[in-house]
Image (tube, rainbow, N blue to C red):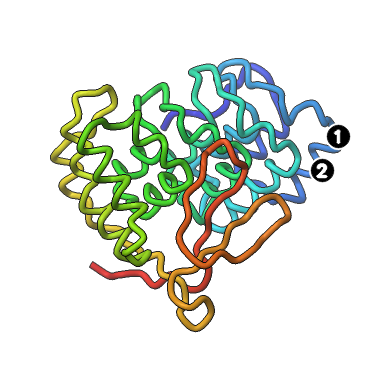
Amino acid sequence: MESCISSAKFLPLHTAAYMGCPPTVLRHLHLLNKGQIKETDEITGRIPLSIAAASCFVHGNRGLDILQELLRLESSSASLPDQENRYPLHLAIESGKTWDTGIESIVLAAPSVLRIKDNKTGLFPFMASAQKHCINDAYMLLTNCPEVIAHACTGPQSTKIMHALTNEEKTTQEKFQSFEELVPMLANEDSEGEYDVDEINKISCRKETFIANDEQSGGNSIEEESRGVKRQVGSFGMHSCDSKKVLRFSGKRPKIKI
C-alpha cells in the first residue's frame, strides 16, 4: 500500500490525520501548532486533509468526523493540491470514501474541483466514482456540476446525459435511472480519460434510489445546503460548481438490493 506520509520529518497533525485519530486529538494538535494545518509533507506534498482523504484508516462515519474537523480547522485546504497536483477530492474518491462519508463535505468546501481532472487518472471526479461502481456518488457529483459534461463528452452523448438530468417531466428516481443507463456511453468517447468499456458494463453493484421520503417532502424535494443556511426546494435543481452549495436529498434513501 502506498504510504500517505513520509518519514523525512515528523509532523504530529499529519500523522494523526493518517491514523484516523479522533477530532479532539486533531484540535489539540492544531492548537499546539496552527501552522501544520497547511504545512505540506516533504515527500508527498500533502497537507493533513489530503493525507486523511487518502488514508485507508479514515473511513465510515468516524472518517467523516475527521474530514469535517480538518475542514473546519482550514476549509481552504480542500483547494490545495499535493505534489502530483491531486486534490483532496480525488484522493478521497480513490480511497473509497463515499458521498455520505466525506465527499460531500469536501465538495462543499471546494466545489470548483468538480471540474478538475485527477492528474493521475485523467478522470473528472464523477467519472472516477462511476469507474469504482459508485453510480449514486457519480450522480451526486455530476448534479452539483452539470456543466462538466460538456468537457467529459461531446455531441449527442452530452445532450442525452444533460436531458436525463434536467428533464422536468421525470421524477428524481427516473432521472437517476436514466443517468445510470447512459453512463456506459462515456466509454465510447475518443477524448482523454475514457472509461474501460468492460468495467463500465459491470456497473450494477451499488444502487441507491435518491428518493425523498414522500411523507416528509411530497415526492422529490431536495435540500439545498450552503454554509450555515438550509432551505427546502420543491423540485430537483441544478447549479454551477462555482457556487459553494451542495444538493442533498432529504428524507430516507432506501437501497435497492441486487
Q: Residues within 10 Å of mark 2 (few under 14, many from 20)?
A: few
The structure residue drawn at horizontal position 82% and vertical position 43%, both measured from the top left corner, is 28
Residue 136 appears left or right of 90: left
**Type of the residue with mark 2:** His
- Give the residue at mark 1: 32
Residue 205 appears left or right of 121: left
User: Where does the image place residue 69, in percent across and percent down from the top left?
Assistant: 70, 47
The structure residue drawn at horizontal position 61% and vertical position 34%, both measured from the top left corner, is 78
Viewer-proximal residue among 27 and 198: 198
Position above or below: 52 against 61: above
Viewer-proximal residue among 19 and 175: 175
Is disc 1 in contact with disc 2, using a CB cutoff of under 8 Å? yes
Kindly indicate the quadrant of the structure image that contains residue 170. Answer: bottom left
Position above or below: 169 against 199: below
The structure residue drawn at horizontal position 45% and vertical position 60%, both measured from the top left corner, is 236
- Give the residue at mark 2: 28
